[in-house]
Image (cartoon, helix red, strand yellow):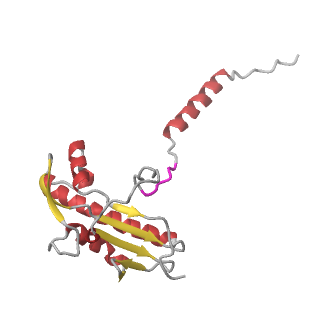
Amino acid sequence: MARPLQEINAGSMADIAFLLLIFFLVTTTMDVDTGIGRRLPPPLTGDEKPPDINERNIFTVNINSRDRLQVDGQPGDIRTLRQQTKEFLRNPQNRDDMPEMITKTFPELGAVRVPKNAVISLKNDRGTSYKMYIAVQNELAAAIAELRNELSMEKFGKRFTELTIDTQIEAIQSAVPIPISEAEPVEVGGE
């Protein structure tokens, strides 16, 4: 007499598969695209005038189609751009060709010497390589990050990235904003 086939109880297998699915969904990390963190200005309505900014308060950085830099009208170098940007935003000698400095009082920081309406104007050519564009953005962001770290070390004894108190973070961000103005790509020069 033939023995009847044994049935496998698959009810618990479905539970195990469901638990494994939940485990992988919870523990798996997704790649998140990262980019340049900038807050874009609100869209223009068409009748707005550009703000009046004194010429000395504008630090111009142009990149042509051959990836050559022009900083404040002079040929520039990516290796010195960070230092030039910091020098412009600090204006330690109170030079007339750099931004006007004022002393501003912040609740968490006290009196801090900051530039008045300083702007870093970045213009790219349509032919500028993405690599050069990112390199320039990195140098400008690094200059601002270093200025924030220096102020944070002076006032709180910690680097800006180590601050955990929101009011301190906001105070440093207010004292050292990201004053980068980026125009539409144009024909800056070169081919």
Identified at 37% across, 76% down, the residue is: 78
Which segment did they paint magenta? 31-36
Name the main secondary structure of what is drawn in magenta: loop
Q: Position of residue 52 (x, y in %)?
A: 30, 62
Which quadrant: the N terminus? top right
Asked if one can make out residue 165 in the rendered structure from this viewpoint, the answer is: no
Q: Residue furthest front?
A: 47
In percent of width and height, residue 45 lies at: 46, 50
Number of marks: 0
| Residue situated furthest right in the rendering | 1
Q: Position of residue 116 (x, y in %)?
A: 22, 61
* Residue at 29% in and 60% down: 145
Please say whether residue 41 is visible from this viewpoint: yes
Left or right of residue 39, residue 149 in this image: left
In this picture, is 19 found above or below 30? above
The answer to whether 61 appears left or right of 133 in the picture is left
Instruction: Give the percent coordinates (x, y) of residue 79.
Output: 34, 77
| Viewer-closest of 29 and 188 | 188
Q: Nearer the viewer, residue 93 or 27?
A: 93
Picture layout, residue 110 above or below residue 79: above
Question: Residue 118 or 75: which is nearer the viewer?
Answer: 118
Taking the spot 64% from the left edge, 26% from the top edge, the residue there is 14
Q: Quadrant of residue 151 in the image?
A: bottom left
Is residue 184 a member of the stretch shown in magenta?
no
Left or right: 44 with respect to 15? left
Q: Residue furthest left?
A: 111
What residue is drawn where x is 24% and y is 52%?
Answer: 174
Q: Where 115 falls versus 108 (above or below)?
A: below
The C terminus: image quadrant: bottom right
Up/down of 2 relative to 34, above or below:
above
